[in-house]
Amino acid sequence: MITTRTAGTPYARTTSTGWLVPVLTLCTSVTMVHAMALGPLMPAIAADLKTSVALLGQISAASMLLSGLLGVLAGPLIDRFSRRRALGDSLIAVVISAVGMAVAPAYLPLLFAALIGAVGRTIALPVAQVIAGDQFAGDQQRRAVSWVMAGGAGAPIVGLPALTTVASLFDWRVALVSLAATTAVLVPLVHRTTGPETPDTGTRVSLQQFLDAYRPILRHRPTFGLFLAIILGNAGIWVMATYIGVYFAERHAYTTSQMGWVYFVIGITLLIGNLAAGGRVGELPLRPLVTIAQVVVGLLVAGLFMLPVTATAGLGLLAAMGLTVGVSGVAGVLLLMRESPTSRATTLTLNTVMLNLGIALGGMIGGVLLAVGDFTTLGWGALLSFGAAWLVWSTRDRTLPNAPAPTTALAPGANHRG
């Protein structure tokens, strides 16, 4: 494999990518399956461990919160150390977590094992995005990023139905062990496909360097506003997503196996949305696209829970939501790559931090809403999406047109504004 070095970066850029994008896509897929695994398995786990569904929902919130906090430290470190090793180690953490959750005899050990997985997920998605962003440029970069993000969408399409099928045939513990085994297979593939690196391991990392990495974002209103919008928008989605399996189980009498197909509908439409954003749709002005998408998501969340919809209509609303979120997710990453004033690794890791904080916030708010009301009350999560839309649009840079995306990959540490 022939490699070149982009000026100013210690990371090699391959001229022959081979299986790189498929492997990165699978990495994001298995980590997303791990993140979502508790959802369809909640009723079975709650019965086995003699706990409540609402309490299990807080495990997802806690793991996402931890992942968000750790991600603040991970971004600047990824700029200096091996991305290949970071991605491999993150998968190993997911393996350990899945096995630990499978053998957990009670709630607290289950929580502890889930938190180990949060550490791995903190790194996996942003590193995969950074590798794709560094190895490609222009239209190829947009398509590569869309495929890597589509891996997360593939989790509900293949991973969660497979997980729930195994759980139906055996039990939820065997399902989690199967997830661990699948993830473990990817570790050697990561080391074979990501190419050689010469990371900067000789420079000590100081607190000042961490502050310097994030200070430009705090000073750049469009990027800072976009990050705040990511928290709110993702919280609005996960008020719904954390409890969607339980919603279909209780309101529409879905079995565990049927709940897997609910996630399949979400996943296939997310995938279509991701890939659409990697094509012609991604050429549209990005801020208006993300703004409109947030408004649409809010309307769909409100409609799902506040209207007396049938199971079929509910699946239709979820499908529309999946398409919208799929487009918006890729558009948001491309917008950050274009506008962020700091390095790509720091930017995309912070993006994952904001996503995880949003998931944690959404899970917590959803649990409170469900505790004080019923599923209809979850519809108020739409207000979070509307707030996100306002932030995206109100913090735009009014002095610059929506310029086309860069046609060359920039070195970590370079300014990525268009």
Image (cartoon, helix red, strand yellow):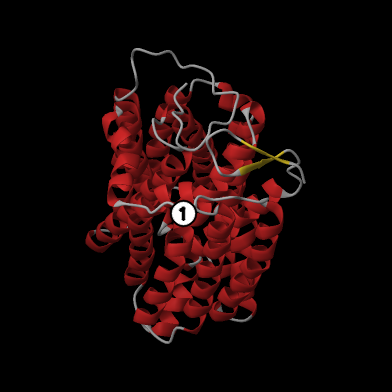
x 63%, y 54%: residue = 157
- 324 w.r.t. 169: above or below: above
Query: What x and y, as percent, mark residue 35?
Result: 48, 61
Kindly tell me whether residue 306 is visible in this rendering: no
Q: Nearer the viewer, residue 37 or 182?
A: 182
**Kind of residue sitting beneath label 1:** Gly
Kindly tell me whether residue 291 is visible in this rendering: yes
State the residue lying farthest toward the left: 372
Query: What x and y, as percent, mark residue 253?
Result: 49, 65
User: Disc count in the image?
Assistant: 1
- 212 w.r.t. 90: above or below: above
- 5 w.r.t. 280: above or below: below
Q: Nearer the viewer, residue 230 or 96?
A: 96
- 126 w.r.t. 61: above or below: above
Q: Nearer the viewer, residue 227 or 174?
A: 227
Secondary element at image label 1: loop
> Which quadrant of the view contains residue 145?
top right
x 64%, y 64%: residue = 187
Query: What x and y, as percent, mark residue 215?
Result: 29, 37
x 59%, y 50%: residue = 198
Q: Which residue is mark 1?
A: 202
